[in-house]
Amino acid sequence: MGNVKGFKEFNRELPSTREVETRVKDYKELYVEFPEEKTKNQAARCMDCGVPFCHNGCPLGNKIPDFNDAVYEENWAEAYNILDSTNNFPEFTGRICPAPCEGSCVLGLNNQPVSIEHIEKSIIEKAFDLDLVKARMPTKKTGKIVSVIGSGPAGLAAADQLNMQGHQVTVYERDDEIGGLLRYGIPDFKLEKWVVERRVKLMEEAGVVFKTKSEVGKTVDAKKLLDDSDAVVLCGGSTIPRDLPIDGRDLTGVHFAMEFLTQQNGIVSGKSLEKAQINAKGKNVIVIGGGDTGSDCVGTSNRHGAKSVTQIEILDKPPTERGEQNPWPEWPMTLRTSTSHAEGCDRSWSVLTKAFVGEKGQLTGLKLVEVKWEAGKLQEIQGSEKVLPCELVLLAAGFLHPQKEGMLENLGINLTDRGNVQDANYQTNLDKVFAAGDMRRGQSLVVWAIAEGRQAAESVGEFLG
């Protein structure tokens, strides 16, 4: 490494966020400009360790010490080439990845880990500034036709790789815009949509064809598409949300998180509403589910002007430090406070939802009880029941499996016991049909979806010869 003592000389530092009272009034990205010299110093903290476990922590296998060293040397072209060799979309992962690489950073054993995610974002944005990022033009044409179903991160990665292999790639998306989860699932304050549009434009220049409002199995005949293609890659995501079928579920004011987030992303993009807006303004909001989607609901509710926001979770509160059962380099199962939480949110753990309470068909409260885990079983704590007032509940308890009706049923795709697409090296029970991303592995991270798309494309390439 260019500075072998950098981890002793510099502390971990990240860009500051805009003031809360300012940022909750818009949907712009949160972070303020970070001096390039400071990014260089952060790259200098990389230790030149004997075995860089960050490689293992990253699902994409990014060559992290290599691009850190290039950043320290201010060789941005080299840094970009190194990063681009393993990651199709660092502008996405540099903004919304929880950075499992940092959880495996050797420096994190007795210090703060290297700020890898920030460095990754810095590299790709500097590359765009220097006009280093070009459309990935194939060097040859195979004449083979490949159809990719779904334009989320897995579908985009698969399409990008397959196009570079020289195949004619068409991506089918049932929504009116390309991007899937990136477009409609993640709020703009975490990922502004010009970032997605910029990449889609590059892929179009490279020859990838995108077709929106094209739902395979509904508006597009799935069997005909299969007949007309040399290979098909299913990247439709895990889209069926986990429901909470308890008393009062049909009350007005109870919604799935994705209903709320998708609608708001459309509003930010200037689209007209097809249904009445799910508005948190002036309401007591309760978010059920402690993950990233729940956090996104918190941030969006704050921007609506909610009266109060509470996030509840059935599991115990995570520890602030690793426990003996969660050693390095495993992903640290510790308490995380997001920027959305910092904007205003009450959080409760070990809480079970008993019923939705309402009057005249309208939600007015949520009946809860405290719980504890004993011998692997959930036990309610007697006398702990209470009703929290609320007029809006957002269900953010995760996703079960992909949609079975339509494409999967029409094609006769075999599923696992959990309802995901069954495969062998990304190939389904139909020779010409492959699968990647959440549709195959279940609900997961954007970085895993990109990795899956790349690996599925490799399997398709081998199949097509």
Image (cartoon, helix red, strand yellow):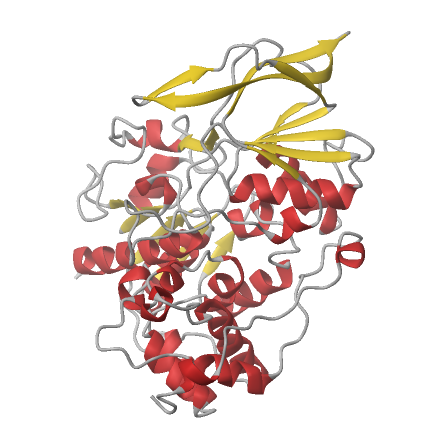
In the rendered image, the quadrant that contains the C terminus is bottom left
Could you say which quadrant of the image residue 278 lies in? top right
In this rendered view, identify the residue nearer to me: 362 or 40: 40
Q: What residue sits 35% from the left and 39% below the top? A: 442
Q: Is 140 left or right of 362, judged from the image as shown?
A: left
Instruction: For residue 271, say whether it is visible.
Output: no
Q: Is 434 left or right of 431, judged from the image as shown?
A: right
State the count of labels. 0
Residue 255 location in percent, x, y?
63, 26
Residue 96 location in percent, x, y?
52, 57
Q: What residue sits 43% from the left and 38% below the top? A: 216
Q: Residue furthest right?
A: 282
In this rendering, is residue 146 above or below 264? below
In this rendering, is residue 174 above or below 376? below
Could you say which quadrant of the image residue 28 lies in? bottom right
Residue 337 location in percent, x, y?
56, 49
Q: Is 174 left or right of 228, judged from the image as shown?
A: right
Q: What residue sits 47% from the left and 87% below the top? A: 76
In this rendering, is residue 28 above or below 136? above
In this rendering, is residue 25 above or below 142? above
Instruction: For residue 92, say whether it is visible.
Output: yes
